[in-house]
Amino acid sequence: MPGASVSSVRFAAAWLASFALIASSWALADETCNSPYIGNLIKGQEDYVYVWTLGIKGLGDGSDKLVTIDANPASKTYGKVVHKASVGRRGEAHHMGLTDDRRFLWAGGLDDSRIYVFDIAKDPAKPRLVKTIADLPGKTGYVGPHTFYALPGRVLVQGLSNAKDGGGVTGMALYNNQGKLIATYPMPTEGGGDGYGYDIAINPQKNVLLTSSFTGKKNYMMNLGKLVKDAEAMKHFGNTMVLWDLKAMKPTKIFSVPGAPLEIRWSLNQGDNWAVTASALTSKLWLIKQNAKGEWQAQSVADIGDPSKIPLPVDISIRADGKGLWVNTFMDGKTHYFDLSNPEKPVQTYEKVTGKQVNMISQSWDGERVYVASSLLANWDKTGADGEQFVRVFKWDGKELAPAFEVDFLKEKLGRAHHMKLGSKALKTAFEDGSERSPLAAR
């Protein structure tokens, strides 16, 4: 698989070294799942929720699209779709991430491996597509761009698979904010590494980056019913997490975390030295933490639901003070809340069925609003009456999730609702050159 040139790796490493410790403390943010390097933060009530949506053939225009929903209760269009930015094709829309200046929203397709860059600053209510990066496989050998993680002036992209055999061995690609490829970082395949990737999460205070692992394109594009009956295919899921030296961008330790560890969330509490993840196939919460000697360890700390029933935990969202964690389980449609006061012994204190299938979950920084979306993957979603597609918003008072509003994505002919990010009118910025065009448009 192609790697970066020596000069580009040195450049990237030097650049990362100079910026790795910029965030001497965790920055306040509009939602708890963002990179700590993101600026122009939302203060108070968010105005919009952006939803990266998978197109469904024969429904609306059938294409993947970025959907904007008005999320401000004071607005006349509260709870309504106010804009749709279609990309004109279906490519298995999945995850997205903001640039550090919060001007651009990068979104990817797991099937066609395209990366779409939307300008959300000129008019936050109406994001517009300003750039498409279509050469990720050709330039890196990686396919299935999954996580888009902001660094100062850069975006680190985690691939799920590779262009050679569609398996799980993959790597990360580093771009500048203008979409130019800077370097690539293969996932380790030695010393216990399986080469698989999924999520990225950084703790600048500790100079560490964590990655998790999932599966390759041959699996994630397969029908779920067929997949679970294929004994050989089920062997090809990630069972590791990797700790990286952030400055050097080199793996330093590989953890055994069986069962496809997915989203990673560092505690955002000042001074904390731990992160959590959920393993999809084994339905467990895992803690990655430094011990008394300063050594990083990974341990299973709690079950999520009944692991024997494979509830399939998917997305997680940590509270701003690190004291609680939301977990969605896809198969039973439940949203769980765990008390993390003692991260070594999480305790579930609440659960609620929030849909017939649920996947992504985000919460506002103040913890008073929780957003839930339905879709996992086009070929993995439920069918028939259980195949509902939605975004549901709840108010949380610490005791109960109370419905605020929902958007039916099938009724609105939008598609399958997946990843969500929050937006604000206050983030509107002036263009540097005073023109009507984004700087990316000419590149």
Image (cartoon, rainbow, N blue to C red):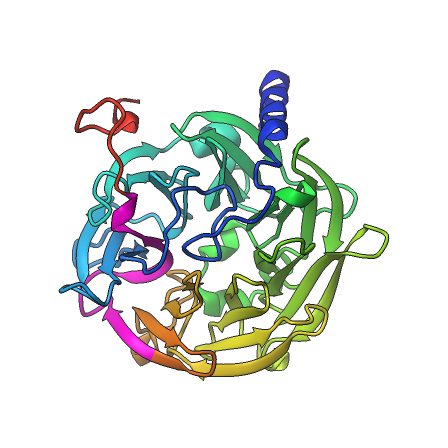
Q: Is residue 69 above or below residue 37?
A: below
Q: Residue furthest top?
A: 7
Q: Position of residue 189 (x, y in %)?
A: 71, 42
Q: Residue furthest left?
A: 76
- Horizontal side of 153 relative to 308 (left or right) equals left
Q: Which quadrant: the C terminus? A: top left
Q: Is residue 413 magenta?
A: yes
Position in image of residue 422 (x %, y %): 34, 55
Can you give x and y, in whole percent of width and height, for residue 63 in the image? 24, 51
Q: In the rendered view, would you say 131 is above or below 262?
A: above
The residue sitting at 56% across, 54% down in the picture is 215
- Whether the magenta-drawn stretch holds residue 198 is answered as no
- Residue 67 seen in render: yes
Q: How many marks?
A: 0
**Above or below — where is 21 with respect to 439?**
below
Drawn side of residue 129 relative to residue 8, left or right: left
Identify which residue, 157 or 416, lies in the foreground.
157
The spot of residue 413 in percent (x, y) is 18, 63
Q: Residue furthest right?
A: 293
Q: Quadrant of the N terminus?
A: top right
Q: Which residues are drawn in magenta?
A: 403-427
- Residue 1 appears in the rendering: no
